[in-house]
């Protein structure tokens, strides 16, 4: 943490004066990434299920 936290906008330097601000920004970014991942999974739910079935069929013993 003392070296900083990487974000999409660059590096936030963390020190005693701004540590809570930096951590709040990191948590905000993590929430945004989690929401984006959740939306992607929902949007691709059918195709990922089909991909899983295809992979399982391909590796299943004959």
Image (cartoon, grey):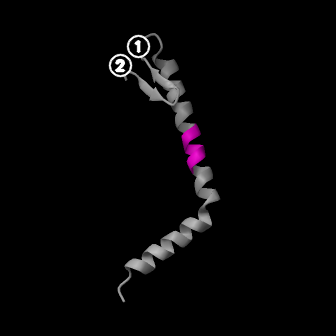
Q: Is residue 21 above or below residue 34?
A: above
Decide which of tag 2 and tag 1 comes sooner along the chain.
2
Q: How crowded is mark 1: few (under 14 residues within 10 Å), some or many (20 or more)?
A: some
Q: What element carries label 1?
A: loop
The segment highlighted magenta reads 32-37
In the displayed structure image, the side of residue 57 where residue 31 appears, left or right? right
Q: Examine the image and state in which quarter residue 31 appears.
A: top right
Q: Residue furthest bottom?
A: 62
For residue 53, which numbered disc appears in the image? none
In the rendered picture of this protein, how many numbered marks are placed on residues?
A: 2
Q: Which residue is drawn at 38% across and 82% down?
A: 60
Q: Residue at x 40, y 22 (%)?
A: 4
Residue 35: where, in percent of width, then height? 60, 44
Q: Examine the image and state in which quarter residue 5 appears.
A: top left
Residue 19: where, in percent of width, then height? 45, 17
Residue 48: where, in percent of width, then height? 55, 65
In the displayed structure image, the side of residue 25 where residue 6 appears, left or right? left
Q: What element carries label 2?
A: loop
Residue 62: where, in percent of width, then height? 36, 89
> Residue 12 in magenta?
no
Q: Residue furthest top?
A: 17
Which residue is labeled 1 in the image?
15
Per the model, the C-alpha gap separating discs 2 and 1 is 6 Å
For residue 2, which numbered disc appears in the image? 2
Q: Residue at x 44, y 73 (%)?
A: 55
Q: Examine the image and state in which quarter residue 1 appears.
A: top left
Q: Is residue 43 above or below residue 1?
A: below
Q: How crowded is mark 2: few (under 14 residues within 10 Å), some or many (20 or more)?
A: few
Q: Are marks 2 and 1 in contact (CB under 8 Å)?
A: yes
Q: Which residue is at the front of the view, 19 or 8?
A: 8
Q: Which residue is at the front of the view, 31 or 54?
A: 54
Instruction: Please name the predominant secondary structure of the magenta segment in the image.
Output: helix
């Amino acid at each position: 943490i003392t070296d900083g936290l990487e974000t999409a906008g660059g590096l936030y330097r963390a020190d005693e004066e701004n540590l809570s601000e930096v951590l709040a920004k990191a948590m905000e970014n993590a929430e945004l990434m989690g929401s984006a991942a959740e939306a992607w999974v929902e949007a691709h739910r059918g195709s990922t299920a089909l991909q899983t079935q295809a992979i399982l069929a391909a590796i299943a013993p004959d």
